[in-house]
Image (cartoon, rainbow, N blue to C red):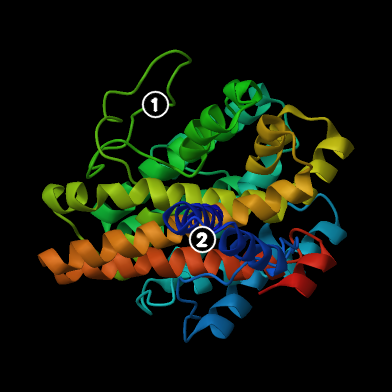
């Protein structure tokens, strides 16, 4: 928009100088004034990413809705019913529409598990959240057997055990991303990210950004404060992208992971920013209700407002344009990469990540998890 504006000004000025005609210059400027100005809209341009639902979505969601509804330790009946109404299990069916039929249930279950654990951690102090995850870590790794009278334990144990029995290598990819994701959620650094730059660095952790290209070995213990696990170095990958690889049996070489690494940052900031815009009002309500450290507002909408002085609603509109620009960069990079020639596995992975981002946005606009009727009305 601004580039077109300045090009018009430049052409008008150049015309005036070359012809010496003040009349022609005034005519150009008058035409500009007739062009409609900016009108704010809360409905963003539609995403360029594809949206598709897994063919077995209804069957899988019916099974897992009841699985979690009957077994999860809800605080009350209303919370359990809101879970059903939010269609949380449908998120992964939209994000991973090409998941193998033999792996779709586990792929959906592990995503929903992290959704629900995050909900619990939001109502805790950081110390309580760390204690919870530290307790569940050896259970998830299969090093400690669960107490079958405690749903958090046996559900966590059963999901990860089933995944490892299916594909041990790719389950470790998922586990590494999951571990970093939950660690970031209970990190007191959350309260020290007032600006966009520091927020994005931390949100990469929350998205499950891991640093080892293949993640063959999980950390043996929950990392201590101030210590960095030696495995978490080098190229990034995320929890959900790891689940995507598990869901479609995508095994990549270190060279292929390195080749696709420029997409991971775009993947992370796109997904995080979409979630931040659409969950912002829910996050504000939760923090005002609980005042818990785990619910501390770490959100791009708030950070952008802090940095620019724009109201939150205007900040959301600007962020949507930024998201669409990231999509354009993604498309350009994808076209360039495919022109160089890539393996079938890498092509499936790249396309799969596009489905994750498109499905995430479609679901986030409509889910009752965010409890905002306006979002459904505005959904593009």
Q: Which residue is mark 2?
A: 324
Report x, y in % for residue 314: 74, 49
In the image: residue 153, left or right of residue 252:
right
**Between 69 and 265, which is closer to the camera in this rendering?**
265
Furthest residue in direction front, as rendered: 20
Vertically, is 212 above or below 318?
above
Q: Classify the position of the N terminus by image quarter.
A: bottom right
Which residue is pictured at 40% across the width and 40% down the height?
A: 209
Image position, residue 83 (x, y; %): 73, 63
- The residue sitting at 38% across, 80% down in the picture is 101
Q: Is residue 151 visible?
A: no
Q: Residue furthest top?
A: 226
Question: Is residue 323 in view?
Answer: yes
Nearer to me, 139 or 117: 117
Please name the residue that numbered disc 1 is placed on.
221
Crowding near pointer 2: few (<14 within 10 Å), some, many (20+)? Answer: some
Q: Are marks 1 and 2 in contact (CB under 8 Å)?
A: no
């Amino acid at each position: 928009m601004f580039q077109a504006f300045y090009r018009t000004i430049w052409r008008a000025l150049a015309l005036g100088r070359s012809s010496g005609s003040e009349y022609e210059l005034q005519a150009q400027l008058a035409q500009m004034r007739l062009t409609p100005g900016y009108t704010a809209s809360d409905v963003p341009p539609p995403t360029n990413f594809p949206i598709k639902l897994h063919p077995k979505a209804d069957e899988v969601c019916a099974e897992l809705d009841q699985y979690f509804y009957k077994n999860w330790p809800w605080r009350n009946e209303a919370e359990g019913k809101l879970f059903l109404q939010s269609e949380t299990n449908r998120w992964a069916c939209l994000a991973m529409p090409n998941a193998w039929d033999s792996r779709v249930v586990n792929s959906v279950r592990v995503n929903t598990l992290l959704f629900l654990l995050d909900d619990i951690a939001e109502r805790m102090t950081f110390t309580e959240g760390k204690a919870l995850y530290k307790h569940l870590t050896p259970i998830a790794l299969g090093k400690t057997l669960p107490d079958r009278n405690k749903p958090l334990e046996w559900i966590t144990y059963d999901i990860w055990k089933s995944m490892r029995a299916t594909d041990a290598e790719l389950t470790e990819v998922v586990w590494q991303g999951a571990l970093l994701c939950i660690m970031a959620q209970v990190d007191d650094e959350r309260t020290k990210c007032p600006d966009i730059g520091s927020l994005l660095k931390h949100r990469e952790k929350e998205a499950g950004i891991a640093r080892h290209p293949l993640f063959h070995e999980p950390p043996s213990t929950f990392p201590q404060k101030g210590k960095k696990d030696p495995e978490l170095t080098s190229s990034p990958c995320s929890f959900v992208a790891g689940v995507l690889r598990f869901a479609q049996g995508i095994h990549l070489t270190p060279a292929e992971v390195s080749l696709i690494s420029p997409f991971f940052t775009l993947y992370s900031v796109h997904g995080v920013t979409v979630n931040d815009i659409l969950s912002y009002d829910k996050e504000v309500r939760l923090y005002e209700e609980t005042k818990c450290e785990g619910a501390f507002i770490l959100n791009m909408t708030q950070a952008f407002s802090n940095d620019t002085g724009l109201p939150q609603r205007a900040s959301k509109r600007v962020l949507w344009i930024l998201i669409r620009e990231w999509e354009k960069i993604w498309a350009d990079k994808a076209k360039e990469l495919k022109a160089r020639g890539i393996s079938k596995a890498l092509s499936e992975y790249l396309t799969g990540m596009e489905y994750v981002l498109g499905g995430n946005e479609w679901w986030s606009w409509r889910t009752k998890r965010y409890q905002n009727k306006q979002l459904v009305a505005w959904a593009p």
